[in-house]
Amino acid sequence: MVELRDVSYAAARARIVDDVSLALPDGKFSVILGPNGAGKSTVLKLATGLLRPTSGAVHYGGDDIRTLPLEALARRRAVLSQHVELAFTLPAEDVVLMGRYPYYGRVPSQEDREIVRRALEIVGMSERRAQPYPTLSGGEQQKVQLARVLAQIWNYDTPRTPRFLFLDEPTTSLDVRYEIHLLDVARGLLGVDCTVVAILHDINVALHYGDHFVFLSGGRVAASVDAAGVTQPLLEEVFRVRAHRVQDATTGDQLWRFAL
Amino acid sequence: MTSRQFQLLLLLLLAGAVVTSACVGAFMFTPGEAGHYLLQGLGLQPATPGVDDLARNVFLKLRLPRVVLAGVTGAVLGVSGTLMQGLFRNPIVEPGLAGTSAGAALGAALVFVLGEHTTLAFTAPLGSLAVPLMAFAGGFGATMIVYRVSAAFGKVDVFTLLLAGIAVNAVCAAGTGFLSYIARDPQARNITFWNLGTFTTAEWRGVTLVSVCFVAGFAWCLRYGKALNALMLGESEANFLGIDTRRLTWSLLVVNTIMVAVATAMVGVIAFIGLVVPHVLRMLRSSDYAFLLPASALLGALVMELVDVVARVVIAPAELPIGIITAVVGAPVFLLILLRQRRVSGF
């Protein structure tokens, strides 16, 4: 379980995150939601260890993140960012191999190579493995990055240990097909002892994939609820819009529509 | 061809270049003679006094240290270019551009001209540790300024980098120019020559210091292949992969400056080698730093041996300054890289 205990973060005297306490349940897909400037990215940076809280503590499965060496932490959690550019040219598989860096010294083992091969297979990029990363399309690049984080927290083989995947608005620049694919793969990780935490913007997408929902507003937790807790008053208050539910005529899904 | 075979090929070419460089010059040696003198110098073969004394002395005291110095300096500059490009995440960076060389030169020139022992001759510039230490201080200060200005907020800005490099280089060059202006004549002439890079000052003590610094620094850097690769993704991503980017930055800046500063104090400013060597290797083979680091040492040494041979031969019996040749070859490559970068990213 990832826990934030009374976490605050201030930069240039402004409190960006204000006394946030959160418990992100194991084996679930948690979604962080909130308007722009609510502190979502900062909370994610604090939870992943990129930023140190001004006060409070972050715990991974009971261990204080400050006691974990960077490399040990890298074996437990991976982070997929919005869009990752490469400063130089490397083939796609070399980028995926970076996910194994926390596991080997100077030369990757046969097992590391095998994991890279399977990760590329899962994201459907096996045939492009030798292609230079900068020449791939944005969607393909994001698939390679997904394969990289899969390789980093590889948990498809036994024995399994709890692993965490953080997604920082991973689908922002992707078309709908890539978006669904990426979130499907992430959702599939729940079956292999992984916990997923994502910042998503689309509330309907979030409700479709998520199990647990954290609403942030003004650097504070407005609500931490399951799907049933995502109510009209909550959405209207957090996003300051009017919200109403509609039913999709063919699938019967409940969808939210918004208006000013 | 695998990376290992490629490196082996470079090693063979380097061996050929070293032999050529050892034999060619105002004094010509056959490889056989050179081998004999080398063995005699090492005490592995008895030398008959009175026979070949002059030739042996020229080879062991002038030619051989020069060959070693050229090779090690080339390796230093090649590796330094690779390290700095990795650190700045940009293919146009090299110790000449980032101010390391010019800063080191200024530091060294300060000691030469204003040092207590103003008689300190250029032929033994490393006779006192003050020179390499001041060179390190100057090189480190200059590099830090360029790095801090251009790499703020976790990203390296190319424009800022170039401009900061120009500014810092200009200040350092002005300082060195001022020193050579106020210096007494023989020193001033030497500074001018040394500003363009020269191996004529090679002597064993200095060569040993440069070599020791290189070997230690290079061995230390080899462990950072993975980290530099991860840094291609940016600082945050490298951090997520378990790499302490702050520590990485600091240790690389320090080690890189030690290697470059000590070499610069000895041979002067040699630009463009650190730019061209990694660029050629990236084009021919791969940008994987686990490959680039050893390969850039080999290719740097190889290129420098060849440049030194050209410098000795082209207007013999006089010699061309090294920097003139490297600039003629390197500047067009620099422009090409800029053009390519512009086409790719339109920065």
Image (cartoon, rainbow, N blue to C red):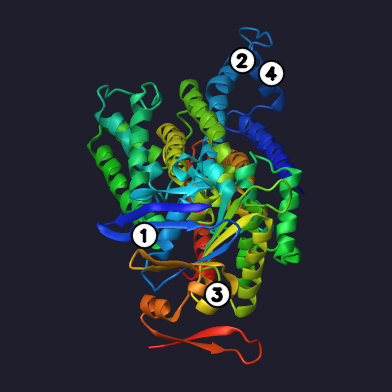
Q: Are marks 1 and 3 on the same chain?
A: no
Q: Are marks 2 and 4 on the same chain?
A: yes
Q: Residues within 10 Å of mark 2 (few under 14, many from 20)?
A: some
Q: Residues within 10 Å of mark 3 (few under 14, many from 20)?
A: some
The kind of residue on which mark 4 rests is His
Q: Are marks 2 and 1 on the same chain?
A: yes
Which of the two labelled residues, at mark 1 and mark 4, occupies the earlier sequence position? 4
Residue B272 place in picture, x, y as percent: 49, 49
Tag 4, which chain? B
The kind of residue on which mark 2 rests is Gly
Find the distance from the CA under tag 1 to the CA under tag 4: 54 Å
Q: Who's the residue at 45% across and 59% down the image?
A: A44
- Is the Cβ of the residue at disc 2 closer than 8 Å to that at disc 4? no
Find the distance from the CA under tag 2 to the CA under tag 1: 51 Å
Tag 3, which chain? A
Residue wearing tag 2: B41
Residue wearing tag 4: B36
Helix, strand or loop status at disc 3: helix
Residue B223 place in picture, x, y as percent: 57, 37
Q: Nearer the viewer, mark 2 or mark 3?
A: 3
Helix, strand or loop status at disc 2: helix
Q: Is residue A18 visible?
A: yes
Residue B74 place in picture, x, y as percent: 54, 39
Residue wearing tag 3: A207
Find the distance from the CA under tag 2 to the CA under tag 3: 80 Å
Is B203 or B337 nearer to us in this picture?
A: B337
Query: In this image, A77 relative to A12: left or right?
Result: right
Which of the two labelled residues, at mark 2 and mark 4, occupies the earlier sequence position? 4
Q: Quadrant of the C terminus of chain A?
A: bottom left
Find the distance from the CA under tag 2 to the CA under tag 4: 8 Å
